[in-house]
Image (cartoon, grey):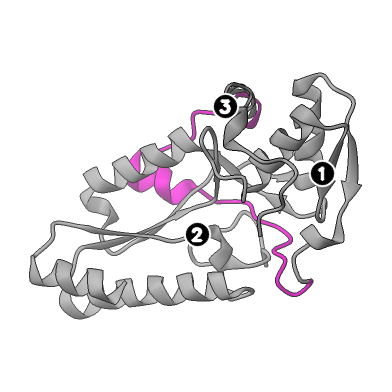
Amino acid sequence: TVNILTTAREEKAEKVIQTSTSEVYGTAQYVPIDERHPKQPQSPYSASKIAADAIALSFYYSFNLPVTIIRPFNTYGPRQSDRAVIPTLISQALVKEKILMGSTTPTRDFNFVSDTVEGFIKIVESENSIGEEINIGSGFEISIGDLAEKIIFFLGKEVKLIKDEKRERPEKSEVERLLADNSKARKLLGWSPRVNIDTGLKKTIEWIKEHPDFYRPDTYNV
């Protein structure tokens, strides 16, 4: 991150977009989560992103480098790695009679990939975004358990949900709740989500059906 920022400063880049993550917020202290929500390093990953975001903003404050922090919530859609929860659930449900899962109670704000991409484009095009941290999220919350049930319903299959302790995050590391306040993106960028969870899941299911070799449902990817 420092190398990129330093080079951007030397080359007088028109804009630097630092890609953050909703994981920096940790388990929500209040919802919906706006950009003022405290940062909580509940995992090494989120800690590294908090640090990278801070370094990026420091270049804006210290050197007037045109930096924007984009903070996508849980992006999903076609071509996503099976390290992510949605393709993991779908790929298992397509070929098996049971889905192995970690904790089903955490909630997430899932954002379809085309909406996330549009957020990036809007930030690139907007002068209002410089020096800002901006959430890109759907504003809709669903538990992992309800998500799995929704996928099973769309597949029209009878599939059992089986708890697998190996797939659970460490208790103190688990982010129990995420729900985006996307009002800043709406106001500054004119951005709003276009694809709801049902439509997005159906698109993702169809893509995974057409590309079965892309996934290994018997393998758990940490």
Q: Is residue 39 visible?
A: no
Closest to the camera, between mark 3 and mark 1, is: 3
Between 141 and 88, the one lying in front of the other is 88
The dot on residue 30 is none
Q: Residue at x 8, y 65 (%)?
A: 12
Which badge, 2 or 3, is on the more N-terminal residue?
A: 2
Residue found 48% across the figure and 74% down from its top: 48
Which residues lie in the magenta part?
171-200
> What residue would you read off at disc 2?
21
Report the residue marked by disc 3: 211
**Three-letter residue code for mark 2:** Thr
Out of 132 and 112, give the one closest to the viewer. 112
Q: Amino acid at mark 1?
A: Gly
Q: CA distance from mark 3 to mark 1?
A: 25 Å
- The answer to whether mark 1 and mark 2 are in CB contact below 8 A is no
Where is residue 181? Give x, y as percent.
54, 51
Q: Which residue is mark 1?
A: 145
Across the whole image, how many numbered discs are drawn on residues?
3
Point out residue 201 in the picture as x, y percentages from the top left corner: 64, 29
Q: Residue at x 50, y 59 (%)?
A: 21
Asked if residue 76 is positioned above or below residue 12 in the image, the reply reads above
The answer to whether 113 appears left or right of 158 in the picture is: left
Q: Amino acid at mark 3?
A: His
